[in-house]
Amino acid sequence: MSNAALELGSARHIEGTLFLFIEMAFVDRLRTGVPLLNPTGFTAFQSLFDFERLRAFQTEETIRYLDALLEDLLGMLESEQWDVALLRSREVVDATIDAYLHHLGNTDPTRKWRSVYLERLKDGSERHQRFAKTFWRLQFPDGNALRQDPIACHSHLESCVRFANEVVTWIQG
């Protein structure tokens, strides 16, 4: 499927199969890169790509992935599989912040720079401050304490679900 044939919002492709990671990384680097040679040719090549469409695609794909993660987490919560749920909750928090960052304009598929992008995309809004603060709080809970206290663990896991739902509601709102 070509980029031109991509229908955002249709989910007519299998999640995670439309573009390879390296392809998204290449387009992001093309968007953010600085030419060392031939700036005119570089600019002409950049004009061939719809970076906004990539950003929208990445946001949509991340939300689709997040939906699957949430389904897993809720099942683990229901069956009281605390350890697996704690591990899955970290993935939920990661995917949530990825969706948020893509929505704000980040197209880099590399996850290692999340904290940099979270800071770079700071807009001074109360919402951004709350999302960033919640991300850090949920990303690094006291795992040992949560594993010893099912009630606290359940509360933490529900906080992860609420965080994901809040971010997705804001993005889709």
Image (cartoon, rainbow, N blue to C red):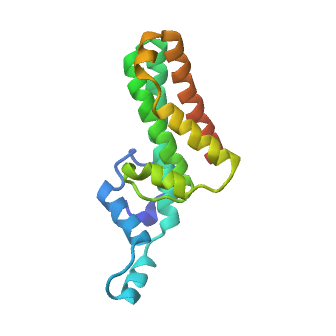
In front of the other: 54 or 130: 130
**Residue ID at (60%, 30%):** 162
Residue 107 seen in this snapshot? yes
In this rendering, position of residue 167 left or right of residue 7 = right
Q: Position of residue 160 (x, y in %)?
A: 53, 29
Quadrant in the picture for the N terminus = bottom left
**Residue ID at (55%, 48%):** 100
Q: Quadrant of residue 133?
A: top right
Counting labels gives 0
Give above or below for 32 relative to 94.
below
Q: Position of residue 87 (x, y in %)?
A: 38, 26
In this rendering, position of residue 171 left or right of residue 89 = right
**Residue ID at (60%, 42%):** 131
Q: Position of residue 169 (x, y in %)?
A: 64, 40
Q: Quadrant of residue 130?
A: top right
Give above or below for 171 relative to 105.
above
Residue 11 seen in this snapshot? no
Q: Position of residue 156 (x, y in %)?
A: 53, 22
**Residue ID at (43%, 10%):** 148
